[in-house]
Image (cartoon, grey):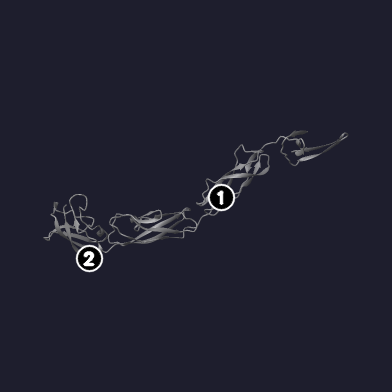
């Protein structure tokens, strides 16, 4: 049987079986299976010879099992690009596979089951949507080696209650993403706060008399490993003798400089503040540096003039005296 076409693609496959039949009129050659196609170029075009048999489709029965693959933490595994399948006719065929890695987290130790869709040739169908499966184990990583604090001292401020101290630096050769938090409710953790990797003093508590504070922090990497470490933080405060004491105030109700006080004294223990008029009458006294004088005595406004203050700090044994001008503009 012959036919002609202006263009043709030859197909070839090996005969499954065949032979010759001999008779009185001659002999006939036959084959069972796919016939070899040949093409011949001629002046009038290309001649293709052969007989094309109908191509029978086969179905996927199952995908063959694949052994466990282990991969180091944070490293994507090298997965096979082809696998073996078995057809419903008992044949074993190697086909391509497209793995779905959406459920794989290489930054978390553990076992993962990954599925892959089969890439099949045209003569194999997959009506039951058979998929390939592979088990992957992400191995554990070592915990962080150490954590340090770039600076462990800070200066007090009577006006600010959120003061930067330093930055935590984590020694971890494998992972560069960590959660750092104050660990537990003990020590002085309540007086501090961590934002990102930075440590801050964040308390309205003056903690009078104290210079040194202790905290414990915990570092956690993405694999769940933890590291706890103790730190000592030092607060620097000026001496009570160097504090600036205002010498004038104007208690006239305009919202500006209406009261008198020395806020930085709140960081010292056992402070006593006294104010006297020119006649030696005690018109104001307090042991709480956050309490300020409003220019009154027993609810009555005092006249403008010069008054005298005395500040005693028992913690340091210091005592200071000075003059104060009360003005009303």
User: In the displayed image of the protein, which residue is found farthest to the left?
Assistant: 279
310 lies left or right of 69: left
Q: Secondary structure at mark 1?
A: strand
Tell whether 131 sits left or right of 225. Answer: right
Work out which quarter of the rendered image holds the N terminus and state it. top right
Q: Secondary structure at mark 2?
A: strand
Circle 2 or circle 1, nearest the eye? 2
In depth, the one of 311 and 230 nearer the eye is: 311
The x, y position of residue 47, in whole percent, is 76, 36
Cα distance in 3D space between marks 2 and 1? 71 Å
Q: Residue at image x 25%, y 64%?
A: 242
Instruction: Give the residue at mark 1.
Output: 136
Q: Quadrant of residue 237?
A: bottom left
- Tell me whether the residue at label 2 lies in contact with that at label 1, contact meaning CB atoms closer than 8 angstroms: no
Expressed as whole percent of the image width and height from the top left, the position of residue 244 reads 24, 61
Is the residue marked by circle 2 packed among few (<14), some (14-19), or many (20+) residues within 10 Å?
Answer: few
Q: Which residue is mark 2?
A: 318
Most distant residue in the right direction: 24
Near mark 1 (Cα within 10 A), the count class, few <14, some 14-19 or many ≥20, is many
**Image height of 11 relative to 255, above or below:** above
Residue 57: where, in percent of width, then height?
67, 36
Residue at x 67%, y 44% (from the top left corner): 92
């Amino acid at each position: 049987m012959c036919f002609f076409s202006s263009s043709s693609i030859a197909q070839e496959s090996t005969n499954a079986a065949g032979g010759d039949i001999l008779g009185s009129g001659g002999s006939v050659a036959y084959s069972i299976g796919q016939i070899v196609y040949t093409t011949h170029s001629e002046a009038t075009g290309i001649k293709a010879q052969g007989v094309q048999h109908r191509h029978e489709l086969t179905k996927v029965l199952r995908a063959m099992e694949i052994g466990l693959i282990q991969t180091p933490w944070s490293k994507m595994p090298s997965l096979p690009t082809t696998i073996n399948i078995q057809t419903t006719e008992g044949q074993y065929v190697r086909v391509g596979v497209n793995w779905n890695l959406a459920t794989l987290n290489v930054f978390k130790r553990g076992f993962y089951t990954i599925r892959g869709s089969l890439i099949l040739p045209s003569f194999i169908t997959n009506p039951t949507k058979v998929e390939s499966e592979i088990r992957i184990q992400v191995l554990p990583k070592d915990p962080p080696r150490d954590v340090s604090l770039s600076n462990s001292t800070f200066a007090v401020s009577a006006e600010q209650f959120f003061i930067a101290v330093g930055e935590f630096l984590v020694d971890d050769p494998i992972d560069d993403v960590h959660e750092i938090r104050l660990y537990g409710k003990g020590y002085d953790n309540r007086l501090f706060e961590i934002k990102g990797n930075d440590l801050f003093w964040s308390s309205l508590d003056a903690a009078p008399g104290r210079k040194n504070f202790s905290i414990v922090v915990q570092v956690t990497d993405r694999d769940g490993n933890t590291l706890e470490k103790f730190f000592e933080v030092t607060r620097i405060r000026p001496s009570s003798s160097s504090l600036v004491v205002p010498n004038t105030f104007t208690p006239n109700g305009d919202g500006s400089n209406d009261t008198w006080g020395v806020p930085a004294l709140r960081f010292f223990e056992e402070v006593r503040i006294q104010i006297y008029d020119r006649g030696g009458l005690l018109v104001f006294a307090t042991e709480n540096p956050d309490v300020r004088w409003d220019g009154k005595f027993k609810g009555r406004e005092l006249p403008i003039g010069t008054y005298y203050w005395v500040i005693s700090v028992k913690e340091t044994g210091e005592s200071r005296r000075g003059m104060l001008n009360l003005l009303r503009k």
